[in-house]
Image: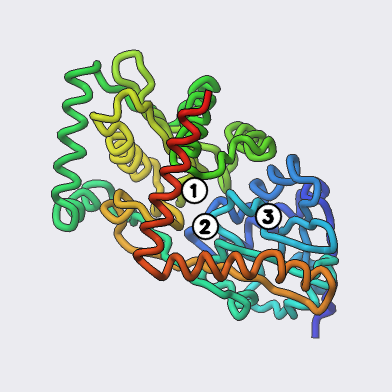
Amino acid sequence: MPTQRIDVMHPADMSPTDLQSWNALRARTAPVANPFMSPEFCQAVGRVRPGARVAVVREDGEAAGFFSYERGRWGRGRAIGLGVSDCQGAVLHPDVRVDPHQLLRASSLSVWEFNHLESGQDLFLPFATGRFASPVIDLGSGYAHYENLLRTRSRKFLKSALAQNRRLGRRVGPLRFVFDERDPGALQTLMAWKSAQYRRTGRRDRFTQEWISQLVRILADTATPGCSGLLSVLYAGDRLVAAHFGLRSRTVLSYWFPAYDRGFAQFSPGLVLHLRMIEAAAAAGIELLDLGRGDAAYKDSLKTRELTVHEGALLRRSPGAVLHWFSREPARTARRFVREQPQLKTAAVHTLKAVGKVRDRRP
């Protein structure tokens, strides 16, 4: 029986051998690998979140698993990058057996919270309290095949998007799409648009949190096979009209921060950008475009199928776990109840929009 031990360290302290082992394990266990589960994403979070840690599971001295997390007061832990990470869990060798509570003890955690746990994470699935659809676009057969699917499943949507593509080019200026834009000014413009959208819709502006703004800028300069920042932009004439920043691996593009210039809303530049981006992604070898958890009409129109992600928490018997339960579980239960009641869900959306209008009227 192999001898097992768990070493805990800051992401920056991982050795080159451990980084290679992480990437090799991920490639073996998830051929279509989401970049949020890469060591590069973990290390980027480690640069902006002081509580970031990695528990390395070793068997007979060899790295056999990696569990990344953030540790707060009272040992209250959360998934690495919680709040912006769209894929969470541990990277483990298929033959490794780890006790989840022992893993928490070794990591000095009383609780570990997650909200985008990927399917197949058998170590943590027993502690999930909710499951959600995460729409995706399959591109393994190429863009032409995907467009044919759209013509069958979302014909009206595709027809409208293609018409808007022509209108935008005719009324504003020739369209130019850049799949991998490196202009930092374009990224800054996208972040400003997204902040305005958060305020307008009554949601918390993520970019007022300095660590998120820094993380996005760090990832924009990250370029590795397992995780690269990708800024895709659409110009009409000399005007930037729509943009998206996400993360990609060799085979997966994770949809993250899309936004557009509201002055051109009548031309639906966001939808035009989506189609251009999907076509370019297929040409670049992307097999799966993960649109992320969350309801949106355009996601329903674009998707080919859905993955399942989970939220929940693994708790140990400790004061920190009790504090976590009292601070998080009642609110989580209330949100779940609202999501499951269509009338309440609609009312909540209207309320958020009303809050956004009040914000816009403030000087």
Q: Which residue is mark 2?
A: 33
Spot occupied by residue 316 in the image (x, y as percentages of width and height): 78, 77
Cα separation between marks 3 and 2: 17 Å
Query: SS class of the residue under badge 3?
Result: loop
Residue lying at 65% horizontally and 51% vertically, measured from the top left: 81
Q: Earlier in the sequence, mark 3 or mark 1?
A: 3
Q: Earlier in the sequence, mark 1 or mark 2?
A: 2
Regarding residue 90, the answer to whether it shows in the image is no
Type of the residue with mark 3: Ile
Q: Which mark is residue 80?
A: 3
In the image, residue 66 sits, relative to residue 59, either above or below, namely above
Nearer to the camera, 32 or 88: 88
Spot occupied by residue 211 in the image (x, y as percentages of width and height): 69, 39
- Left or right placement of residue 183 versus residue 300 in this view: right
Q: Which mark is residue 250?
A: 1
Type of the residue with mark 1: Arg
Q: Are marks 3 and 2 in contact (CB under 8 Å)?
A: no
